[in-house]
Image (cartoon, rainbow, N blue to C red):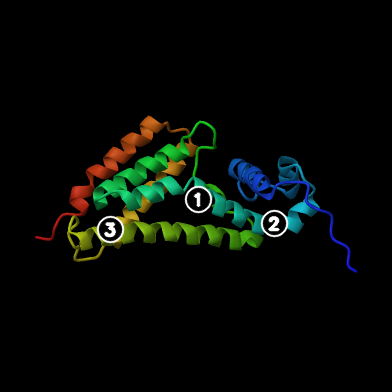
Amino acid sequence: MATRGRPRTFDPDTALHQALDVFWERGYEGTSINDLARAMGIASASIYACFGSKEDLFRQVMALYGTASGGPPRDALSDEPTAREAVHAMLRATADQITGPDTPHYCMLILAAPTGAVENHSVREFLADARRDMFTTIRDRLDRGVTEGDLAKQPDGLNGIARYYTTVVQGLSIQARDGATRDELETVIACSMAAWDTLTAAPA
């Protein structure tokens, strides 16, 4: 009869949250397996056995991050009744998330691995795919605005507007990382929304 392996002495969900804190603070390349083992309170062998490689663990961390920190902006984009209100609420929710008192001031999708070693190319592409999905989600919400009649159909499509507000989201993260306060980010948001009427004006 085969013997059973030693039962886990840690909670995987708790360990995953602890790993999130480390990756968020140090970025992907700045975090070692030893850093993770210390923060999670488990041996590196247990990390590999439960979560897989460092990259596997990072991908699981990003799924957790997307649910927690990505949830409010995504919900705001979906729940507001008009496209304009949705984009405005999304930007404000983003600013709230990246200036919280208990977390590092940046979005992990933007800055967890912007550059790095060749062997980590797959991680950078993984994050780039998530950022491209952000653009698609914003564009889809604009499309919904056209369908529901609160946004004029644009002769050149909505990609340019979606790209603009995606860039604003990403810029907010960089500004927060460099020390911009929530009030200062609100000024950026107000400026970006001042451009809404020009960007979305009905064709002559």
The residue that label 2 is drawn on is 51
Q: Amino acid at mark 3?
A: Leu
Indicate which disc residue 142 carries: 3
Measuring from the top left, give residue 63's x and y in whole percent. Answer: 55, 54
Q: CA distance from mark 3 to mark 1?
A: 22 Å
- Horizontal side of residue 75 vs 8, given as left or right: left
Measuring from the top left, give residue 111's x and y in whole percent. Answer: 52, 48
Report the quarter where the C terminus lies. Answer: bottom left
Which circle, 3 or 1, is nearer the viewer? 1
Give 20 or 170, whichever is nearer the viewer.
Answer: 20
Measuring from the top left, give residue 29's x and y in whole percent. Answer: 65, 50
Q: Is residue 132 depicted above or below 34 in this figure?
A: below
Indicate which disc residue 67 carries: 1
Which residue is rendered at x = 70% and y = 56% of the image?
A: 51
Which residue is rendered at x = 32% and y = 60% of the image?
A: 139
Report the quarter where the N terminus lies. Answer: bottom right
Marked residue nearer the N-terminal end (3 or 1): 1
* Pointer 3 with pointer 1, Cβ within 8 A: no
Q: Amino acid at mark 1?
A: Thr
Marked residue nearer the N-terminal end (2 or 3): 2
- Horizontal side of residue 27 vs 183, given as left or right: right
Which residue is rendered at x = 84% and y = 59% of the image?
A: 5
Marked residue nearer the N-terminal end (2 or 1): 2
Q: CA distance from mark 2 to mark 1?
A: 18 Å
Tally the marks.
3
- Horizontal side of residue 46 vs 112, given as left or right: right
Q: CA distance from mark 2 to mark 3?
A: 38 Å
Q: Secondary structure at mark 2?
A: helix
Q: Secondary structure at mark 1?
A: helix
To which quarter of the image does residue 88 belong?
top left
* Pointer 2 with pointer 1, Cβ within 8 A: no
